[in-house]
Image (cartoon, rainbow, N blue to C red):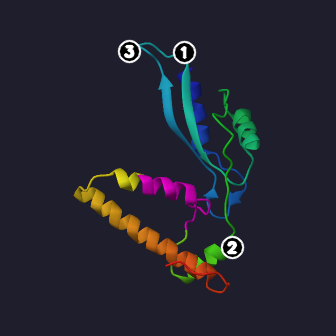
Amino acid sequence: MYSLAVEDIQWIKNFQFDKQDEYLGPIKMTVTMIEAGYQHNVVPDECKYVIDIMVDTYSYEYILLTINANVHAEINARSTRLKPSSIDKNHPIVKAAKSLGITTFDQAHCLIKPYYLFHLLKWVQKITTTPENLFLLQKLKKGIKTYIRLLNELFKNERHKTLG
């Protein structure tokens, strides 16, 4: 049983899909957790593993079909609820960031949504003033100032009242 799991994990590590994402590059599959055996000196009768997949090019269904067609194990998705998203490199907010010299992520789907910013600010109110936390607060203040600059740049050519 374990030799089949090893073969599967090798296939997962080495397999390359035909298409690549413009931002993420080739689809990367990584086995991140392995569970097998319960006792020393006994060959496990079962091996479970988790595959982390960064995908924006193919559907989850296609990925699962491809993996299942090439491995001995039965592969099931933990969840297909969250779908990848991205923002076009010609979107006004991306252009505004570039005009300010702000480095954009290669992973264009990593945008901070206002919801997360709100919860981050609530967290800041709870932390103590240790040196490590003061450093984090300085980084957070810098991030907020950069975010305001980004919004000002985004709206500077429109008839909106600017922030700041």
Give the mark, 3 or 2, whose residue is nearer the N terminus: 3
- Residue 57, quarter of picture: bottom right
Reply yes or no: does residue 113 show up in magenta.
yes
C-alpha distance separating marks 3 and 1: 13 Å
Between residues 80 and 35, which one lies in front from this camera angle? 80
The mark found on residue 70 in the picture is none
Tag in front: 1 or 2: 2
Residue 117 in sight in this render:
yes
Please tell me how crowded label 3 is: few (under 14), some (14-19), or many (20+) other residues with Cα within 10 Å: few
> What amino acid is found at the position of numbered circle 1 in the picture?
Asp
The mark found on residue 45 in the picture is 1
Please tell me how crowded label 2 is: few (under 14), some (14-19), or many (20+) other residues with Cα within 10 Å: few
Between residues 108 and 8, which one lies in front from this camera angle? 108
- Residue sitting at 50 percent across and 17 percent down? 44
> What amino acid is found at the position of numbered circle 3 in the picture?
His
- Residue sitting at 23 percent across and 55 percent down? 130
Which residue position holds label 2?
Answer: 91
The answer to whether 7 appears left or right of 143 in the picture is right
Between residues 145 and 68, which one lies in front from this camera angle? 145
Q: How many labels sit on residues? A: 3
Q: Which residues are magenta?
A: 105-122
- Residue sitting at 63 percent across and 56 percent down? 26
Give the mark, 3 or 1, whose residue is nearer the N terminus: 3
Tag in front: 3 or 2: 2
Locate residue 88, reporting x and y percent.
69, 68
C-alpha distance separating marks 1 and 2: 52 Å
Q: Residue furthest bottom?
A: 157
Locate residue 117, reporting x and y percent.
50, 58
Reply yes or no: does residue 120 show up in magenta.
yes
Residue 102 in sight in this render:
no
Which residue position holds label 3?
Answer: 40
